[in-house]
Amino acid sequence: MPRAIVCLLDSVGIGGAPDAHLYGDQGANTAGHIAEWAADGRADRDGLRAGPLHVPNMDAMGFGAALKLSTGILPPGLTETPKGGRFGVGREVSRGKDTPSGHWEIVGVPVPFDWGYFPQSEPAFPPELVEELIRRADLPGILGNKHASGTDIIAAMGEEHIRTGKPICYTSVDSVFQIAAHESHFGLDRLYKLCEIAFELTKPLNIGRVIARPFIGETQDTFKRTGNRRDFAISPPEPTLLDRNQAAGNQVFAVGKISDIYAGSGVTHKLKGTGIPQLFDRTLEAMEMAADRAFIMTNFVDFDSEYGHRRDVPGYAAALELFDRRLPELISKLRHDDLLILTADHGNDPTWPGTDHTREQIPILVFSPALPPGEIGIRPTFADIGESIAHWLGLPPGRHGKIFL
Ligand SMILES: O=P(O)(O)O[C@H]1O[C@H](CO)[C@@H](O)[C@H]1O
Ligand SMILES: [Mn+2]
Ligand SMILES: [Mn+2]
């Protein structure tokens, strides 16, 4: 009896979105530019990695072929002909380029509405929102109140935060309200409670997520964000593949931040982890526990949060290579009728100006010992992924997407 596993490589876009210009992202290509830079020796870092991008296992599943299909260009170091899997390209119909839209659409629920965003001006947040947050959470005030990169703003304001007890609130081009606070000086539970309040207050503004960004350290140079990040997200507007599989009496394993992204809906087993190796271990553990018709979904967030937003090309290349080295372990665990899909939710091109996500198409790399290799083309919605998995697991058809298997 079949099972399905999705490894979502957060932000590993492959360029070519026809509407990228609407987002200021025409020409952005996360994986393609990393491969180009690596081939030029611009992704070398002492003690970390050097030379062309080396991802032979992903490439065998069609990574290079999907890049070529997406943009017309085969990046250096990759091949056009996959050895095993079925490859294709996903195009997003939901507006925006953030994690929730991409993840929801992948499990069959394109986002039918526009998210709310905060303006680039400073202060960025409406005064009523800030006043109410301060009142309800009994705060001495807030710091930030602007668009910022999370690591930069913690470095700039972390010491003042410790001194004053004011949390650091910031946003980005995404529909997010983020709160950074010190794990011990401010308190982790207190930060989570504050985020719950902020989540209630930002709901009427259609803000997709409130994100708790705890950190440790005592000085500008030693501050470090921890793995205790938590996302408070609104629920998808229709039942997702997770809900549908749970309703059919099957297991749904959410690894990493997957459960947060779907507001816990449809999840039967939640496995947490920090960093690519641990998230990989958790995925293998889920495979051990998974019964027939189980759905396993893992979000590998580090590509996005540690390397994409930080515009760290060598770091991003090394992370892809690390993931690729572990991939054979997962493939060797597949049963004959298991389905594995590698994909992404949006881009975050580390060679692109700024520190934000980029609107891109995504790779859809499909592998099963039961499937002959081939091409599935450019899919007009990410929802084709969810619909194909639903079909594989024997669920009734959903409302969005077409089967590619
Ligand atoms: O700069 P950091 O705090 O990593 O924030 C980033 O993380 C958010 C969620 O991916 C994005 O909207 C972006 O603002
Ligand atoms: Mn994401
Ligand atoms: Mn991000």
Image: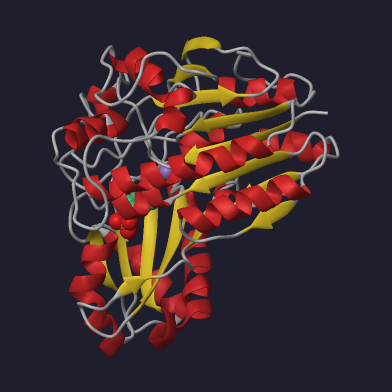
Residue at point 74%, 19% (across, down): 397
Residue 75: x and y in percent read: 26, 23
**Residue at coordinates 60% horizontally, 13% vertically from top-left?**
404
Colouring? secondary structure
Vertical position of residue 306 compared to residue 87: above or below: below
What x and y, as percent, mark residue 315? Answer: 28, 50
Q: Quadrant of residue 26?
A: top left
Residue 236 visible (yes or no): no
Place residue 295 in its image quadrant.
Answer: top right
As displayed, is residue 392 above or below residue 103? above
Of the pair 209 and 341, the residue shown nearer to us:
341
- Residue 275 location in percent, x, y? 46, 58
Q: Residue at x 42, y 40 (%)?
A: 115
The residue most toward the right is 249
Do we see residue 295 in this rendering?
yes
Task: Dividing the image into four quarters, tell me where ligand 2 lies.
Answer: top left
The front one of 356 and 207 is 356
Query: Viewed as shown, does residue 97 lie left or right of 160?
Result: right
Q: Position of residue 60 (x, y in %)?
A: 46, 24
Q: Nearer the viewer, residue 336 or 10?
A: 336
Considering only vertical position in the picture, is 157 above or below 71? Answer: below
- Say whether residue 238 is left or right of residue 206: right
Q: How many marks?
A: 0
| Quadrant including the N terminus | top right
User: Where does the C terminus fall, quadrant-wise?
Assistant: top right
